[in-house]
Image: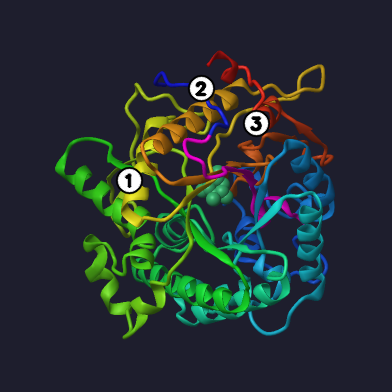
Amino acid sequence: MSTRAPATAAAASDVPFLWGVSTSSYQIEGAAFEDGKGPSIWDTYSHQPGRIVDNDTGDVACDHYHRYAEDVALMKALGVGAYRFSVAWPRVQPKGRGAVNEAGLAFYDRLIDALLEAGIEPWLCLYHWDLPQALGDLGGWANRDCAFWFADYAALIARRTGDRVKRFATFNESSVFTLFGFVMGGQAPGIADRNMFHRAIHHVNLAHGGAIDVLRALVKDASLGIVHNVQPCRAATPTPEDVKAAALFDAYWNGAFADPQLLGHYPALIADLMEPWIAAGDIARICRPIDWFGLNHYSPLYMRASDDNPIGVGWGAAPDSVPRTSFGWPIEPDGFRDTLIDLSKRYRLPIYVLENGRSNPDVVDDKGEVNDPDRIAFLDAYIGAMNEARAAGADVRGYFVWSLLDNFEWSSGYSQRFGIVHVDYATGKRIPKASYRWYADLIRGTASPSAAMR
Ligand code: FCB
């Protein structure tokens, strides 16, 4: 890892900086079939044998649905100013359209009220991948109508929560759930079809634009954005095939959503592929003004040409010299700094980092404590890199750690722990880790072990 000043909470400008934590519905809530919730495509997918490590499911997860008050208390003690969570669409609208589930809405009311009571700003994400299965049965995002069902769902949430919630994100990581769900494998709905993939991209973009219009119309003083996962895409080797594959992947991963939403066009490399699905007026429907850019960032991607899937791009390896997390994800804070600087210039929006963190094979020691120095070193390096980007002029307004809790890490199930709070999945018991205390110190501006060295 490069040498850089340790992380501090000090702002590079006078804009007040927002510290937060993030989670998502399917990864923490549990109560998957309780109080009238309908099944999502992730309920279906995780129950298919062999899809998830150890055949884990989100049926119980962190049981946040019942333990939310304890989790809000943990956030209050941590000192965060904001909490980003997602609403499970099938919890509030079991079939994705039509009938509303009052018990599901009441859960989010309780959560939002508890957050406000604790002085924590709710950041509500409408979609973190748990599409109602009933809509999945109709083709899901490959069906153009899904964009309009999503706008209706956005209206439901806006009307119900807009008196208390002002920060809304439409989607989390559209590139990830469409790439993995429709061509590369590893995520719901588990399809491999290039045409469906391209349709899904376009329909998610339409859904975003439609939802922004709805939220703007229904929520007074709304502050709206979307969360993109932007990672530099590098060729795993210098061969022309791998260089070409990495460029195509960059267009899908980094450009297929943000470019039409914010610049009004698809990236040149995929424009022809998208053309058949674009109807008159669509780009204007997609490219709506938003207030901020939400960034999730973990590590650069190393790609190679591959015949394994319909887009011809597969995963390569980072150079041996690059350190990696236990998950195998490269640790390159310089890539984070450069991404922030590039994004700030490209889209000219305030940026909130809405996910960053690492997994670790954390264990509870004899004293009942969880020490995770590797996570502290990671956060320290990445927050330091972010501060360098800010000093270089990037307009970064907030940083949210992924994640508050250890949780269901998609196809890796419970094998990867990303939390700053340890969760014993058998009992639900929470134990704040050393990184939780480090982050609390950082937020309060008191000396953290490394910040004190400054
Ligand atoms: C992101 C997802 C989030 C979590 C982290 C580790 O891609 O948005 O749900 O799984 O990765």
Of the residues shown, which amino acid type is indicated by label 1?
Answer: Asp
- Can I make out residue 15 in this image? yes
Measuring from the top left, give residue 400's x and y in whole percent.
Answer: 58, 43
Indicate which disc, 3 or 2, sits on the residue closer to the N terminus: 2
Which residue corresponds to the image point at 38% horizontal and 60% vertical from the top-left?
258
- Near mark 1 (Cα within 10 A), the count class, few <14, some 14-19 or many ≥20, is some
Would you name the residue on which mark 2 appears?
A: 6
Tell me, yes or no, whether the two marked residues, 2 and 1, touch with CB atoms within 8 Å: no
**411 left or right, relative to 159:** left
Whether residue 31 is visible to the viewer of this picture, yes or no, is no
Label 2 packing within 10 angstroms: few (<14), some (14-19), many (20+):
many
Name the residue type under label 3.
Tyr
Choose the circle earlier in sequence order: 2 or 1.
2
User: In 3D space, how far apart are the residues under numbered discs 3 and 2 (Cα atoms)?
Assistant: 13 Å
Query: How far is mark 1 from mark 3, CA to CA?
Result: 27 Å
Taking the spot 73% from the left edge, 49% from the top edge, the residue there is 61
Element type at mark 3:
helix
Give the residues drawn in magenta, as a range: 11-31
Q: Position of residue 323 (x, y in %)?
A: 42, 24
Q: Is residue 273 above or below residue 410?
A: below
Q: Residue at x 67, y 34 (%)?
A: 420
Determine which of the numbered discs, if any, sits on residue 342 in the image: 1
Report the residue at 32% width, 27% height from top. 319
- Residue 156 vs 18, above or below: the answer is below
- What's the mark number on residue 439? 3
Asked if disc 3 is less than 8 Å from ligand 1, the answer is: no
Above or below, 334 relative to 152: above
User: Which SS class for mark 2?
Assistant: loop
